[in-house]
Image (cartoon, rainbow, N blue to C red):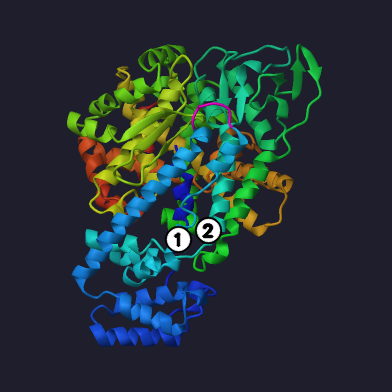
Amino acid sequence: MKKSLFFIVLAMLLFVQCKQKEIKKEEVGKPISWIQQATIDQVIDSLTGLYGAANNARMGKGVGQAAVLWRESDGSAEDFKTFCIENYIDDPLKLDTLFLKLSRNSEILSGYMLKMMLELKEPLDLDVGEIQPIDELFGGYDPASHVTEDFFNNRIAFITVLNFPFYSLKEKSDIGPSWSRKQWAYARMGDQYTSRVPSALLQQATQTLTKADSYISEYNIFMGFLVDQGMKTYFPSDLRLVTHWGLRDELKSHYGEVGGLEKQLMIYQVMKRIIDQSVPEDVINSDACQWDPYQNKVYKEGKEVSFKSEPDTRYAVLLANFKALKDIDPYYPSYPTYIDRAFDVNMEISEPEVEKLFTDFISSPVIRQVGGLIKKRIGRDLQPFDIWYTGFKSRGTVNEQQLDEIVKKKYPTKDAFENDLPNILIKLGFTPEKSKEITSMIRVDASRGIGHAWEAAMRTDKARLRTRIGKDGMNFKGYNIAVHEFGHNVEQTITLQDVDYYMLSGVPNTAFTEALAFIFQKNDLELLGIRDTDPDKEYLMTLDNCWAAYEIMGVSLVDMNVWKWMYANPGATPAQLKDAVISIAKDIWNRYYSDIFGVKDEPILAIYSHMIDSPLYLPAYPVGHLIDLQIEQYLKGKKLADEVLRMYTEGSIIPQLWMKNAVGAEISGEATLKAAEEALQKIK
């Protein structure tokens, strides 16, 4: 569901852009360095005299970028000249030796730092008892926060920058297609040290994001203690659901069920209370009271009692994330906002390009036709929560209780699920040998939250699959999420273990890991031995993908516009931010959703927890849906396992090139809309 916040934060580091023998102020902003252009020219002239002009472009980039990062505390201008002349490597064999040593040590450092961080966070992430204040302190500690600063001080970072310069996204897009794998690996080495953020600020950001993660993970609603105006309950007394994922998935499970609409309406009312922060504090993660979310009344022993609502904590957490990441902005001259870094650096697709991709898609007439079909299928006017309509899935007509019984019997413990991972891969077409190889590098943990996947950062470590396991075993919702997370882990393992260069390990951005997770998740019933003989299955899956992309694109647009608002209003209070979020959510709804649903001013697009605990992670999901369908279309008539291994060993080259190499076309919404249009003609 999400990859580690540790790597999300580190991936946002600036990639400073410098042209050969020239640093333009408009390109890099106000330089932190005090090295003058004349000094840079002198160094380049000296190196050209020593080695000739054959590699002048790389030489100019390396010297210029090192100069931007050099500070007075690093030495004088003469020290800078001496450093560059002594440490620049022109010989290809010596350069390759340096690259291999840097790669090896990068893997050691990244791997053990992440492993330490994960183990320190286990009391927060895993279901191992009540969280204590000391757990929060250790969980918020980032052992890697000083590494970049240390490596500039001991000049390892400068040696890397000088010999492996950074290439901008435009440069990678223009000349990257002609690069060899080694050249791509060299370019990714150049992405390692592109800014000098003080360790105190990195540590502050990690602590803030850790607190946000804990806030969401601990925000549970005890569903059996919800009542309507007649004091009637609708849910089992032991059902505890985390916001928003648990609430959303419970709502999804009641399509086609007698009395299901009443349960869905109650869940949606709870969601609206969470959004506007009118939830009574006494009912958050507590079964001490009964709560009527319609009238917002609290009862103890059948008697109404007074209460205090949560004091805009949700928005205080979001605001804290913004401030912690904004504090880092001055150290990113080419990408001066977190928004820039989230898209141009981390996603490697620009924010305007992503926004256009989304708005074009959700404005399509095809989406309106899908909405009309859903209305016919459910036999009533659409409700706002029907953005999560699940009737296109086979499970929309399968009894949830029966699925729970099947899953709990099959997976009574986390170990039972972990032991079955090789069989799951075999069912998906992987050979027994490859299945064993991949799953030997994955471990399963009982999660405190709804579940997530953590990658490993060194080839001797294991990826981690976290999923919620009840006392009586895993239920179907937990299983469905676990299969999704397993897709992440398979990607994480392939792209770490099988990619030819460590510097190319991983995927272009998180949308690509989400795509494989979605593909795995779609096979959840078949993996249980429940065969879907519906001849319309493929068309239904296409419509489901299309509707899911429509839903999450709106959520992502809210997230993106909220961050724009926070930058425009940096002094806002939590209450002001709350009003802004609700207003933005309603505006996006009115522009792209109200015509289908027949109701205006709905805030539902603001419920997503990732908006609170994973800054600007949400846009990866809809891009993942589009990639998912393009890959699915390409996989027709081919072996899934073989193609997954081929595609994902491309590693972390830029997104559009990855897609061209994988399926022959760039990322687009047109393939999904075209497939949905064809499906609409088949499904009446």
The residue closer to the viewer here, 359 or 472, is 472
Report how far apart the C-alphas of labels 2 and 1 lie in the structure. 8 Å
Span of residues in magenta = 126-131
Quarter of the view holding residue 453: top left
User: Closer to the N terminus: mark 2 or mark 1?
Assistant: 1
Classify residue 563 as left or right of residue 194: right
Which quadrant would the N terminus be assigned to in this image? top left
- Per the image, the residue denoted by label 1 is 148
Query: Label 2 is placed on what type of residue?
Result: Ser
Quarter of the view holding residue 513: top left
Query: Label 1 is placed on what type of residue?
Result: Thr
Q: Secondary structure at mark 2?
A: helix
Badge 2 vs badge 1, beta-carbon distance below 8 Å:
yes
Q: How many marks?
A: 2
Image coordinates of residue 84 in percent, x first then y, are 35, 78
Asked if 346 appears above or below 75 in the picture, the reply is: above
Magenta stretch contains residue 127: yes
Magenta stretch contains residue 589: no
Quarter of the view holding residue 404: top left
Image coordinates of residue 245 in percent, x first then y, are 53, 31
Asked if 360 appears above or below 182 in the picture, the reply is: above
Classify residue 3 as left or right of residue 327: left
Classify residue 280 as left or right of residue 199: right
- Per the image, the residue denoted by label 2 is 199
Asked if 360 appears above or below 524 in the picture, the reply is: below
Residue at the (47%, 63%) spot, across then down: 149
Residue at the (25%, 38%) spot, across then down: 635
